[in-house]
Image (tube, grey):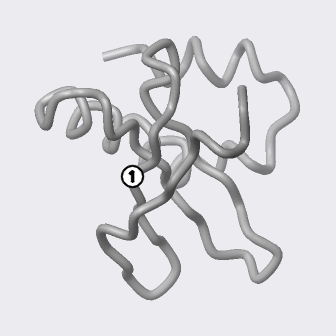
Amino acid sequence: MEENNIKPRRVTHTENISTIYANLPTSIPAYVVQNSDMSYTIVLNSRLSRERNIVSYWHEMKHITEKDFEKEDVQQIERDAHKD
């Protein structure tokens, strides 16, 4: 992925969760990162529909609320996140 293709745009910010849009490959709907200050940034794909971004947002929020950043098995995290 070329770094110069990613142009983030801030959407929301709560006390410890920021949400931004970035021009990502369409194969990546969203991702979340834990920042050094223990806050989180959810990055949504600006190329996808509003409806898809809503689904992606809640998927990433589940990673935060389930404390997935404290876990080690990425495959199990995604299996658990896709239940329901």
Taking depth in this image into account, of 40 and 84 the one nearest to the observer is 40
| Left or right placement of residue 35 versus residue 39 in this view | right
Q: Which quarter of the figure has residue 50?
A: top left
Query: In which quadrant of the rendered image does the C terminus lie?
Result: top left
Residue 51, percent across and down? Answer: 12, 31
Q: Which residue is pictured at 73% across the width and 13% down the height?
A: 75
Q: Secondary structure at mark 1?
A: strand
Please tell me in which quadrant of the rendered image residue 5 appears: top right
In the rendered image, the residue lying farthest to the right is 72
Callout 1 environment at 10 Å: few (<14), some (14 to 19), or many (20+)? many
Disc 1 marks a residue whose amino acid type is Tyr
**Residue 33: percent from left, percent from top:** 67, 53
Q: Is residue 25 left or right of residue 84?
A: right
Relative image position of residue 44 (x, y in whole percent): 40, 43
Displayed quadrant of residue 52? top left
26 in relation to 58, above or below: above
The total of numbered circles placed on residues is 1
Q: Nearer the viewer, residue 43 or 36?
A: 43
Residue drawn 42% across the image and 60% down it: 20
Q: Does 71 appear above or below 80?
A: below
**Pointer 1 residue:** 21
In the picture as drawn, the residue positioned furthest to the bottom comes out as 15
Residue 13 rendering spot, x and y as whole percentages: 38, 79
**Towards the viewer: 5 or 24:** 5
Q: Residue at x 66, y 45 (%)?
A: 4
